Image: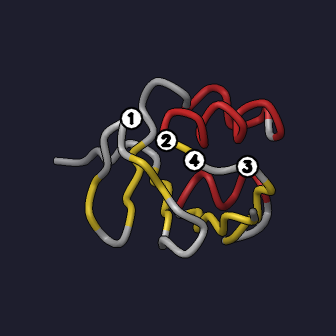
Amino acid sequence: MAYQVLLFATLKEKLGSNKISLDIEEPLTVADLLSHLFTLYPQLQPYQKRILVAVNQNYASPTQLVKPEDEIALFPPVSGG
């Protein structure tokens, strides 16, 4: 199944796009999705430990299941003062 993933800020800049599609079998956890993402897009690996994932506009844990129809968004760490 195709999962649509929205990218923001630095992640968007690294891939040159605000959305990617991952064709992966179900069922899938957030951790599984990220593993596939970092394999397909190694340029995102520096963000691997700090990336934030939202599913349907709520922050998601690594064990949360995702479905192809979910809105999945990835954010780099936020900093500021």
The label nearer to you, 2 versus 3, is 3
Q: Are marks 3 and 4 in contact (CB under 8 Å)?
A: no
Q: Is residue 39 left or right of residue 74?
A: right
Q: Are marks 2 and 1 in contact (CB under 8 Å)?
A: yes
Q: Quadrant of the N terminus?
A: bottom right
Q: Find disc 4 in the rendering and name its residue.
A: 27
Q: Find disc 2 in the rendering and name its residue.
A: 29
* Up-down relation of residue 6 to residue 31 (above or below): below
Q: Find disc 3 in the rendering and name its residue.
A: 25
Q: Position of residue 27 (x, y in %)?
A: 57, 47
Residue 19 picture quarter: bottom right
Going from the N terminus, do you reach mark 3 or mark 1 first? Answer: 3
Going from the N terminus, do you reach mark 2 or mark 1 first? Answer: 2
Q: Position of residue 37 (x, y in %)?
A: 70, 41
The label nearer to you, 2 versus 1, is 2
Q: Position of residue 16 (x, y in %)?
A: 79, 63
Residue 21 picture quarter: bottom right
Q: Is residue 56 left or right of residue 33?
A: left
Going from the N terminus, do you reach mark 4 or mark 1 first? Answer: 4
